[in-house]
Amino acid sequence: MYKVKEFAEKAGVTVRTLHHYDRLGLLKPSGRTDAGYRLYADRDFARLQQIVTLKFIGLPLKEIRTLLDSTDLDLQSTLRLQRRLLTEKRRQLEMAILAVELAEREVEAEREVETEAMVTANVKSDAEGNQAGASRKAPDMAVLRKIIEVMERQNDMEWTKKYYSEEAQAKVEDRGKLWSPELQAKVTQDWQELIKEVEAAMAAGEKPESESVQKLASRWKELVRGFTGGDPEIQKGLNKMYADRQNWPASTPQMFNMEVQAFMMKAMAAGKE
């Protein structure tokens, strides 16, 4: 058994941290001295390591307590869970780094174009200079927005995990390694174009079983397959998520409304028939 100062030194944390974790119920000492001082055992190291790792990943302390108290995992299972969460965090960081690198390249390319234009023109009036300065702001805002979108997407998608089994989550994370900001931009554009065509078909009164709508349904399924990879476990989780659409967080951006979703579900059912 270790007194709190000894345990803190061996674990590489502060006494204040241990007191804080005790107050939150995250890491209760294994015992007390006759005088009431905290005592920690070797098994408390494992619990502390779990807390530190999950906190590093970004989970709030309250969620960490709920997770650790609600699961009865052995050390191997706990380490496996931590590895999976850390791998997902690494993927998110790599996506963010790539977005920043792409933004750097775009800004550099824009500056080179502006420099070349300045050399060609030799002399510009004050008005032209002001106009050039204004034109620089637009591309800068565009590239910064890409970075924001990538990072916000990582945060906004955390709530979706509850719809997927542990196996499906692991598969989604593996497929996420193939994702990039460029691919996200292309997929978003493809969806936007398709949804416009679906809305136009609905406005024109076309039937779900019509040939033109069936072609739209085929494109819809292909875009969904781009996310699921055709995996039935991922598809099952995706279906559960969209079936619970009314309970999505209010801040979640929705690319299409319930009417479009219902129309395409009818088109796919008609296609199967």
Image (cartoon, grey):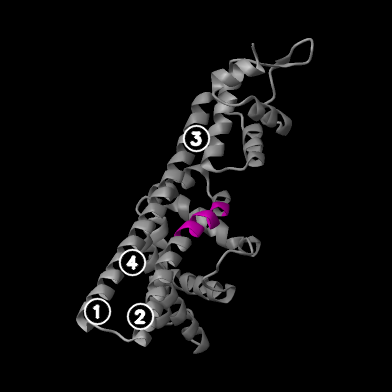
Residue occupied by mark 1: 117
Q: Residue at x 36, y 62 (%)?
A: 103
Q: How far across and down, in percent of the image, does residue 192 sit?
A: 44, 75
Contact, CB < 8 Å: mark 1 with mark 2?
Answer: yes
Secondary structure state at the residue bearing disc 2: helix
Foreground tag (3 vs 2): 2
Q: How far across and down, in percent of the image, does residue 96 sit?
A: 41, 54
The three-letter amino acid code for the residue at tag 3 is: Gln
- Is 155 colored magenta in this rendering? yes
The three-letter amino acid code for the residue at tag 1 is: Ala
Secondary structure state at the residue bearing disc 4: helix
* Residue placed furthest toward the bottom: 204
Residue occupied by mark 4: 107
Contact, CB < 8 Å: mark 4 with mark 2?
Answer: no
Mark 4 closeness class: few <14, some 14–19, many ≥20 residues within 10 Å: some
Residue occupied by mark 2: 132
